[in-house]
Image: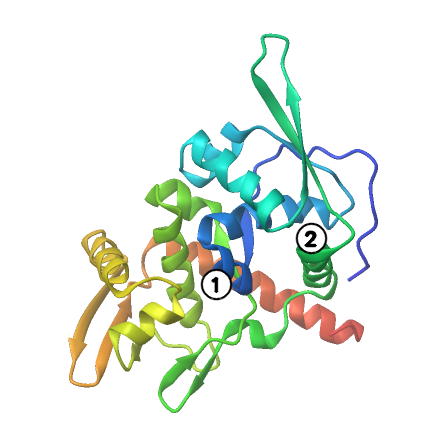
Amino acid sequence: MADIVPIKKRATSARPTNLFLLTQCVELFGVLDAAILAELYYWIAQGDEPWRKAQEHADLFAVNEKTIRRHSIDLANKHQCFGRRDSMLKNGKKGACKYFAKKSGNSKALKEQYQALFNRGFKKTDFGEYMAGEVIEVQRYVTLPVAYIERLKDIELAYLLARLYWITFSENPSLEFSFSSQNKLAKAMFMNRTTLMRYLDLLQENNYLEHFSRTKGIVININGESDLYELMNDWIAEKKELREELIMAGNY
């Protein structure tokens, strides 16, 4: 795969098919902030400085505009994740914001990580591993299809489903897997136990999975016939094909 090169003009208003959320960003900032960073750095890593209206991100992530403005300002000012410049319309209302990388701090680290992600492809360890009957997550990012957010209308619920789906494509693929406790699963998903169980109940009600408790923890049984699961399955097949191409080209 050739290295990314900057392109002067690009249609950066297109809605992405997938978002690549860095696990570290989810852990530090939460799912919504990690998604904002993923969408922006997809373009920034390619040399662009995208313009975004708050409503664009609000529609994409299924939240309200005020929430997007608050989170974007915090990511820019408090966490130094990117530079952000407002524009004003003639009627005095705020227009689109320009987002760009800065040369230090979190912004520099994010740009480097996303450039590495897109340049080097997807390594084997990004698929997770089974060890001693437990799933050990070693991936540094999660692929979150935008279609999941559109369907579920909740970005954290969509993230959880994507994470659970990713586990089924690990070293020892299986639609059924277990964790030793609800708390351990909640910690792995970066949410509290009450929220986790509420989300699992919602996913079960909509036939995306079944879950039940047993003496040594919690069992998750994924519905492999769901159209959202098939979407992930197609994506994984594409990534495996890419990996084979990288190996053959000596770039893996």
x then y, percent, for residue 32: 46, 48
Q: Looking at the image, what colour scheme do you see?
A: rainbow
* Residue farthest bottom in this picture: 132
Task: Give the residue number, with chain letter if any, for mark 2.
Answer: 107
Quarter of the image where one finds residue 36: top right
Side (left or right) of 228 relative to 122? left
Q: Residue sitting at 51 percent across and 49 percent down?
A: 33
Of residues 248 and 177, the one drawn nearer to the viewer in this rendering = 177
Side (left or right) of 167 relative to 115? left
Q: Residue sitting at 73 percent across and 60 percent down?
A: 112
Q: Residues within 10 Å of mark 1 (few under 14, many from 20)?
A: some
Q: Is residue 5 above or below residue 190?
A: above
Q: Is residue 76 above or below residue 250?
A: above
Q: Is residue 45 above or below residue 11?
A: below
Q: Secondary structure at mark 2?
A: helix
Q: Which residue type does callout 1 highlight?
A: Glu
Q: Secondary structure at mark 1?
A: helix
Image quadrant for the N terminus?
bottom right
x then y, percent, for residue 210: 22, 65
Going from N to C along the chain, the mark reached first, 1 or 2, is 1
x then y, percent, for residue 10: 75, 35
Image quadrant for the C terminus?
bottom right
Task: Give the residue number, with chain letter if any, for mark 1.
Answer: 27
x then y, percent, for residue 27: 48, 63
What whole-number distance in Å separates the C-alpha atoms at marks 1 and 2? Answer: 17 Å
Q: Residue sitting at 59 percent across and 69 percent down?
A: 240
Q: Which residue type does callout 2 highlight?
A: Ser
Of residues 249 and 105, the one drawn nearer to the viewer in this rendering = 105
Quarter of the image where one finds residue 30: bottom left
